[in-house]
Image (cartoon, helix red, strand yellow):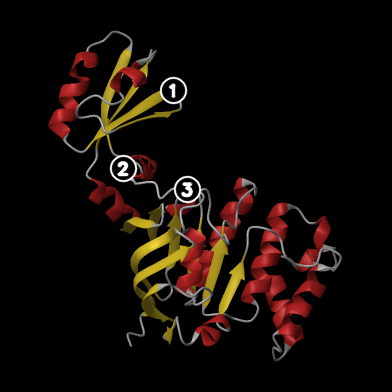
Amino acid sequence: MNGEIAIDVRGLTKRFGARTVVEDLTLQVRRGQIFGFLGPNGSGKTTTIRMLTGLLTPDAGAGTCLGFDIRTQARLIKRRVGYMTQRFSLYEDLTVRENLAFVARVYGLDKPRQRVEAALARLGLADRAGQLAGTLSGGWKQRLALGACTLPEPELLLLDEPTAGVDPKARRDFWNEIHALAARGLTVLVSTHYMDEAERCHAIAYIAYGRLLAEGTVEQVIERAGLATFTVSGALGDLAQRLAGAPGVDMVAPFGNALHVAGRDRAALEAAIRPYREQPGLTWRPDEPTLEDVFIDLMRGAPDNGGAGEIGA
């Protein structure tokens, strides 16, 4: 077994009835890595994470998580995993300190009081230790939830859309803490819709309709997409409609008061936009594709598996 690899799976497939939710997925995640899962709702992200960590048995495929077989040793994996859901799941009628103390007792942790006080200090919750959890803002609830799921010192942390509905400063503080945990050796799997959060991950995987469409570092994913990109601003009018579907144009997407126009064949793309380059009121410039450009393009070419949503998500 390679001790540097936290998750190593091959050919994972999961079906619910006649629908294949995840198909033939192969992936490796290194220890201490923050690995982001991206994709539209119903894409298979949650099902994938649950299979990777032994929480859901695949219909096909095999692999290991934290050195344990995901099929036969799921119970051993679960003991080493912390799971933070999008919905706040602690007791709102208990104080911050009481919630953490309850978690410590459930897990039978040694020196529970010291552990609780250390978590309060680390997450900046000491001044709110006596406050009822239900009266906390979204950002502080998030910190408390993170403290609760890391209190037993798991080797792997699952975060399912953890910052949905949280203000930008709280999101930034949350991600600073996640990076600090990863620096101490914790492996983190996080599903998110936010592009800026994807860019904070060490590596990402993009999943749509049950298939893995891209994976690697952000830089690798953008480079492998092979998109040539131009940004056009000014009096756009119906330019997006005129360019969409033109030979050589694979993607047209609005970004504020501008359009990103991209294609895989640079020569064909330049030929398509040439009639508009000298049009009065328009300013064109070559640009670098963004992660969002790549994902829009990936979705355009992804086959729909006919699912209306992820079962058990």
- Mark 3 or mark 2: whose residue is earlier in sequence: 3
Residue 13: x and y, percent? 39, 67
Q: Tell me how many marks there are.
A: 3
Q: Nearer the viewer, mark 1 or mark 3?
A: 3
Mark 3 belongs to which amino acid?
Answer: Pro
Residue at x-position 45% and y-position 59%: 18
Report, in whole angstroms, how far the alpha carbon at label 1 lies from the one at label 2. 26 Å
Dots 1 and 3: beta carbons under 8 Å? no
In terms of secondary structure, where does tag 2 sit? helix
Examine the rendered structure and indicate whether residue 49 appears above or below residue 168.
below
Q: Is residue 100 left or right of residue 67?
A: right
What residue is shown with label 1? 257
- Mark 1 or mark 3: whose residue is earlier in sequence: 3
Residue at x-position 31% and y-position 17%: 242
Examine the rendered structure and indicate whether residue 137 appears above or below residue 60.
above
Mark 1 belongs to which amino acid?
Answer: Asn
Instruction: Say which quarter of the image contains residue 38.
Output: bottom left
Mark 2 belongs to which amino acid?
Answer: Gly
Q: Is residue 286 left or right of residue 212?
A: left
Dots 1 and 2: beta carbons under 8 Å? no
Residue 213: x and y, percent? 33, 54
- Foreground: 104 or 77? 77
Q: Nearer the viewer, mark 1 or mark 2?
A: 2
Examine the rendered structure and indicate whether residue 304 appears above or below residue 145.
above
Report, in whole angstroms, how far the alpha carbon at label 3 lies from the one at label 2. 14 Å
- Mark 1 or mark 2: whose residue is earlier in sequence: 1
Instruction: Say which quarter of the image contains residue 139.
Output: bottom right
Q: From this viewpoint, which residue is outermost toward the top?
A: 280
What residue is shown with label 3? 40
Q: From this viewpoint, which residue is outermost toward the front?
A: 18
Residue 291: x and y, percent? 37, 45
Residue 301: mark in rendering: 2
